[in-house]
Amino acid sequence: MLIFYILLLLLPLWGCKVAGKKFFVEESFSKSVTDSIKGIFIWLVFFSHFASYVQYTSKIDVLGHKISIVLGQLIVACFLFYSGYGVCEAIKRKGTSYVRSIPKNRIAKTLLHFDIAVLLFLIIQLCLGNTYSFSRIALSLIGWEAVGNSNWYIFVILALYLITWIAFTCAKNNLIQSGIFVTFLTFALIGFLYLTRWSWWYDTALCYVLGIWVSVFKDKFLSLITKSNFIWLICGFASIGLFGLLFLYRFPNYSKLNLIFSLLSAPAFCLVITVFLTKVKISNKLLVFSGQYLFEIYILQRIPMILLKEWGIADMNLYLYFLLCLAATIALSFAFRFTIKKVDALVFS
């Protein structure tokens, strides 16, 4: 699998531009750039999920998988960061009308699309002879449980959208007050998930909060980073140093310290990427497509992995299995996007 990781890491070089003495200020948060970054990480998610369906025997394949192990939850950090940033930017542009639309456009639509995918997984599992209790099926529709699908991210992002709607409604769109309210409620969510779920449910949630605050102070934040090349280097090394301290030197023997370091390392990683993108513009058609179809790729990728493994392809040839899963995921993403557009037109028209 190492070759596929190398190809993915080389893909950002296609269409990559370096600012030289100047900076990519607004471009660093442009849709094409953010979609490209999300495109890189959604395929790292694909690789990580793929590894759970196979047994690597080659040392090269194991080495490739170690990349996913080292990165851990960082592969989803930017999804939450750009979600928080994007929601806050939309509120800054559209104001109260956008806040009022969050329950419909952000929560209800995401939940409907997710539930359609869950029902598809459920049909497949039933055809394979797997059955689930009514309570598990009901809870899987909100992402609390699963029927073979990926679920935790959907539950968390829906909760964060709800938190955002509550915060900006109660604070009457005052950005500072809303940001404080979002931060407080997100910590409450983290506490709840800490007591009830596993660490990967909550250890990247603060990335969403960081996205909110970066949007609130966007002009000051970017003007500081891009004031000069010297300041940019200081900010770059400072963010890398902070991330390195939090990520590499966590305290596994002290659970509370480990929790704090884990919660802060993912936002620090997002800061590193943000500073980097003010100097280097990453954007190409393949990555932009992947970022635009992030939801579909994320939620559907396990279907071909499950079915092709059941049909014996995984045991036949590892690389054939991988390529078929890849092709099937892309095809399913197109079909699913076409379907949900039709459903949205019927339900939300």
Image (cartoon, rainbow, N blue to C red):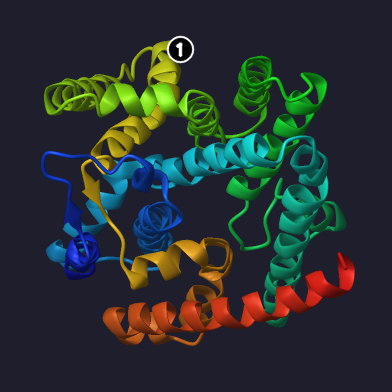
Q: Is residue 16 left or right of residue 191?
A: left
Q: How many marks?
A: 1
In which quadrant will I find the C terminus?
Answer: bottom right
Pointer 1 residue: 256
Could you tell me residue 268's position as x and y percent?
A: 34, 27
Quadrant in the rendering for residue 65:
bottom left
In which quadrant will I find the N terminus?
Answer: bottom left
Quadrant in the rendering for residue 224:
top left
Q: What residue lies at 70% left-to-right and 39% top-to-bottom?
A: 161
Q: Is residue 138 left or right of residue 322?
A: right
Q: What residue lies at 35% left-to-right and 29% top-to-bottom?
A: 222
Could you tell me residue 125's position as x and y percent?
A: 68, 74
Label 1 packing within 10 angstroms: few (<14), some (14-19), many (20+): few
Q: Is residue 140 visible?
A: no
Q: Amino acid at mark 1?
A: Lys
Q: Is residue 245 visible?
A: yes
Q: Nearer the viewer, residue 228 or 192?
A: 228
Could you tell me residue 41's position as x and y percent?
A: 37, 54
Quadrant in the rendering for residue 274:
top left
Q: Nearer the viewer, residue 310 or 123?
A: 123
